[in-house]
């Protein structure tokens, strides 16, 4: 366990901590949902597009070689799960989906134009536009600003900041990410002045998350 300001980070399997995690936490996560499984079994509907890839990333994410079961994560008071369209048959009906428009006005290519997050929030679906197209990335992750991609499914900090804002969380609510990756949700929580609990099973990504959150703590007065 690492304690970095108001962030508590665990390196391990989130299922071992789930039972003791208060359901009042806001669960906001991008879980593994079987992209590698589709490749391994040949069932990917995107095989033609994958063959046209010109940039290769390491997509070896623990747990991504099997279908994702969202059931253990649905009883939290607030839930946001990215990739919900990949396991929608195992989710309750919902109206307030969050949509990340990754093209932001540019044309389509062989990658998805957007990513969808299932939520248990009230209200209509909402859209957030933030360009994220290979090396062309808006915001602080832009290469011209020194941005570096440190995780294969990394999200922009600005996107996760927006997601947390959509949740309208009371002051002091703990943001919980059981699939923390490189810690982007934790950085966004810090900028909202909210405590964070993150879990990451891969030691390499866990270390990267710790490094990023330490760097954020040095810059963000709210993260104290």
Image: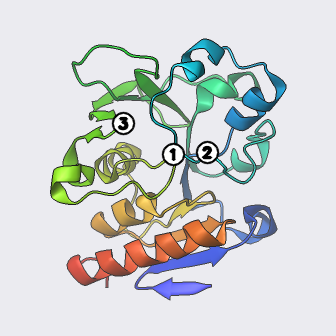
Q: Earlier in the sequence, mark 2 or mark 3?
A: 2
Q: Does residue 84 appear in the picture of this structure?
A: yes
Q: Does residue 97 appear in the picture of this structure?
A: no
Whether pointer 2 and pointer 1 mark residues with C-beta atoms closer than 8 Å, the reply is yes
> What residue is rendered at 22% in x and 54% in y?
140
> What residue is rendered at 31% in x and 85% in y?
224
Nearer to us of marks 2 and 1 is 2
Percent of width and height locating residue 19: 79, 65
In the foreground, 192 or 157: 157
What numbered label is drawn on residue 56?
Answer: none
Percent of width and height locating residue 129: 27, 30
**Residue at label 3?**
134
Q: Earlier in the sequence, mark 1 or mark 3?
A: 3
Nearer to us of marks 1 and 3 is 3
**Residue at label 1?**
153
Few, some or many residues within 10 Å of mark 1 (<14, 14–19, 20+): some
Few, some or many residues within 10 Å of mark 2 (<14, 14–19, 20+): few
- Above or below for 212 versus 5: above
- Residue 173's image quarter? bottom left
- Report whether 202 appears left or right of 158: right
Which quarter of the rendered picture does the N terminus lie within?
A: bottom right
Marks 2 and 1 sit apart, C-alpha to C-alpha, by 8 Å
In the foreground, 193 or 13: 13
**Residue at label 2?**
59
Q: Which residue is the extreme one toward the left?
A: 144
- Report whether 54 appears left or right of 144: right
């Amino acid at each position: 366990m690492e304690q970095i300001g108001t962030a508590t980070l665990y390196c391990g399997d989130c299922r071992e901590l789930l039972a003791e995690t208060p359901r009042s936490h806001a669960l906001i996560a991008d879980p593994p949902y079987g992209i590698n499984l589709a490749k391994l079994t040949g069932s990917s509907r995107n095989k033609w597009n994958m063959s046209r890839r010109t940039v290769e990333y390491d997509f070896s994410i623990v747990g991504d070689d099997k279908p994702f079961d969202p059931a253990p994560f649905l009883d939290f008071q607030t839930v946001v799960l990215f990739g919900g369209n990949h396991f929608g048959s195992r989710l309750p009906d919902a109206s307030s989906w969050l949509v990340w428009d990754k093209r932001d006005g540019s044309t389509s290519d062989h990658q998805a134009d957007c990513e969808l997050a299932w939520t248990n929030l009230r209200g209509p679906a909402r859209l957030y536009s933030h360009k994220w197209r290979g090396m062309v990335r808006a915001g602080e992750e832009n290469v011209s600003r020194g941005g570096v991609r440190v995780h294969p499914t990394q999200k922009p900090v600005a996107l996760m900041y927006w997601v947390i804002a959509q949740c309208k969380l009371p002051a002091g609510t703990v943001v919980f990410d059981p699939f923390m990756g490189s810690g982007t949700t934790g950085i966004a929580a810090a900028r909202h002045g909210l405590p964070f609990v993150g879990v990451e099973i891969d030691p390499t990504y866990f270390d990267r998350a710790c490094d990023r959150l330490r760097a954020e703590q040095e810059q963000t007065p709210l993260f104290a």
